[in-house]
Every structure is written in C-alpha cells, then in structure tokens.
Amino acid sequence: MAVEKYTKKYVLEKSLKFIEDYHPSTISELIAFLPFSKITFYRKIQVNSKEYQQIDEKLKSDKLKVANAAKRKLLNSNNVTALISVIKLYGSEEDKQALNQNVNVNAQASFSYEDVKKVEVNINNLTLEEQKQLNALIEKVKGNG
C-alpha cells in the first residue's frame, strides 16, 4: 500500500502559509509558489469545497491587507507610481475605479460667488496645520513648491 505524499490537510495548510508568506493575488499565482503541481492542488482541493473557499477568503483578506498598507504608504510617499501599481494589483474594485478616473486639470470651470464663499468658510474652519498643508499644496500646484 503506497503512502500518499500530499494529503488534503497538507495542501490546505501549505496554501494558507504561502498566502501569508508570498502574498499572491490569484489562485494561479498561489499554485506557482507551491511545492506540488496544479493537478495535485485541484485533486486535493475541489473548486466548490470548503477548503477552496477557505483559501479564496484568505487570498481576498491578504489582498486587502496589502492594499491598505499600500494606501497608508501612498499618503506618505513621493513614489506614487509604484504604490499605484500595488493598489491596482491588490486593491478593491472601488480603489481600482478611483485610480482609473481621469481628471481634466485644464477644464474651464466657472464658479459663482456663493461657491467661492462656501470654500472660504470651509478654509476658515481648517486647523493651523491643515492650512499650512493646503498652502503648501497650492504652491506646489502653482509650480512654486
């Protein structure tokens, strides 16, 4: 009687561990990291099984953690391009849609007196630190920063 090399439990545990260690973004990518074949994976982990669902949930959860870490870094980084790539890979659909929005900075816009007054009121409610950050941003946009 031959001893089975890869049990369902082993395949599941190895899959969950590799998700934690290597942060793959898909099942296919996960399988590429594993020390057994795609055929072995699918023989042991059926697509509609609770084990498959467990792996899929772990992938989704890990992707969210990576995306959230990238978003935190994005707020404090000068290398936006690399971080945007990470968010496109790991981010939620909302994150991806937000990154794909095009903003026309050259668009002609007209503002009413009331609109300007609303902005002035909101600016006056900023803390000193927020006002400094806003002024720095304005200078940067103007090309002086």
Image (tube, grey):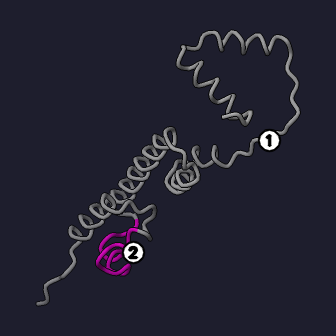
Mark 1 element type: loop
Q: Quadrant of residue 113?
A: top right
Q: Residue at x 65, y 14 (%)?
A: 123
**Residue assigned mark 1:** 104
Relative to 52, residue 128 above or below = above
Q: For this view, does 79 lie left or right of residue 35?
A: right
What x and y, as percent, mark residue 11?
26, 70
Q: CA separation, marks 1 and 2?
A: 41 Å
Which residue is nearer to you in this view: 99 or 14? 99
Q: Quadrant of the N terminus?
A: bottom left
Main secondary structure along the magenta-highlighted residues? helix
Three-letter amino acid code of the residue under disc 2: Ala
Q: Residue at x 72, y 12 (%)?
A: 120
Q: Does 139 lie within the magenta span?
A: no
Which residue is nearer to you in this view: 2 or 105? 105
Residue stretch in magenta = 30-47
Q: For this view, does 30 lie left or right of residue 96?
A: left
Which residue is nearer to you in this view: 139 or 74? 139
Q: Does 44 lie within the magenta span?
A: yes
**Residue assigned mark 2:** 32
What x and y, as percent, mark residue 101?
70, 45
What x and y, as percent, mark residue 44?
29, 74
Q: Quadrant of the C terminus?
A: top right
Mark 2 element type: helix
